[in-house]
Image (tube, rainbow, N blue to C red):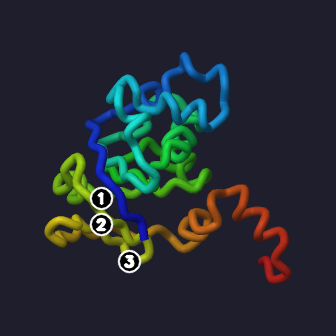
Amino acid sequence: MIQGRVWRFGDHINTDIIIPGRYLDDYDPKHLAAHVMEDADPVFARSVHKGDIVVAGRNFGCGSSREQAPVALKAAGVAAVVAKSFSRIFYRNAINIGLPALVCPQAVDGLQAGEVASIDLLEGVVRIERDGAEFRFEPLPAFLAEILEKGGLVPYTKARLRSPDKE
């Protein structure tokens, strides 16, 4: 279960907005987190808390295939991104590093900045804590949920290689 404060962004938030190229001289996740979303919201990087949720419109993560974009969000403490749609490469990069990326247009329309929401990944529900309103999304396929549970593709693969019952 994820529970955190909502941060709202609009449509077509590209990877240069998530983590500007001028900060890619250092790939340390802490460095990236210090500058995440600063061109869209100058206070985001210093105000986001562990467990917070980014909510955005259409085509979140468009632009380059920069994997540092989801890394910066996760390192800043973002627990999930809920959007109307994602750039395909951002979506997969997010899953690969263990950051849930959820498509739920109704939640995007219903959630307000600053309010607290919870997400049940297994049940496919986003809930507004203030009034209990719920928005359903298609739960992730089992293999993607397992990748997220393990913390990303690398830890998932390491666990599979160690498992005596691997397929």
Task: Report, in whole angstroms, how far the alpha carbon at label 1 lies from the one at label 3.
Answer: 13 Å
Q: Amino acid at mark 3?
A: Glu
Q: Which mark is residue 126?
A: 2
Which residue is more in the foreground, 118 or 124? 118
Whole-percent x and y of residue 28?
Answer: 66, 33
Q: Which mark is residue 123?
A: 3
Whole-percent x, y for residue 112 in the image: 19, 50
Q: Is residue 63 visible?
A: yes
| Residue type at numbered disc 2 | Val
* Nearest the eye: 8 or 92: 8
Query: For the residue labelled by badge 3, is the local secondary structure a helix, a strand or a loop?
Result: loop
**In the figure, is residue 59 to the left or right of 75?**
left
Q: Secondary structure at mark 1?
A: loop
Q: Residue at x 41, y 65 (%)?
A: 2
Spatial CA distance of label 2 from label 1 is 8 Å
Residue placed at 63% from the left, 57% from the top? Answer: 152
Name the amino acid type tagged 1. Cys
Classed neighbour count for the residue bearing mark 3: other residues with Cα under 10 Å, few (<14), some (14–19), many (≥20): few
Q: Earlier in the sequence, mark 1 or mark 3?
A: 1
Say which of 93 and 43 sits in front: 43
Q: Residue at x 40, y 43 (%)?
A: 48
Quarter of the rendering containing residue 159: bottom right
Of discs 2 and 1, which sits in the foreground?
A: 2
Q: Please identify the quadrant where the C terminus is shown.
A: bottom right
The answer to whether the residues at label 2 and label 1 have Cβ atoms under 8 Å apart is yes
Query: Based on the displayed image, in which of its 4 quarters is residue 62 positioned?
Result: top left
Q: Is residue 84 visible?
A: no
Q: Residue furthest left?
A: 131
Residue 151 horizontal side relative to residue 133, left or right = right
The numbered mark, 2 or 1, whose residue comes first in the sequence reads 1
Residue occupied by mark 1: 104
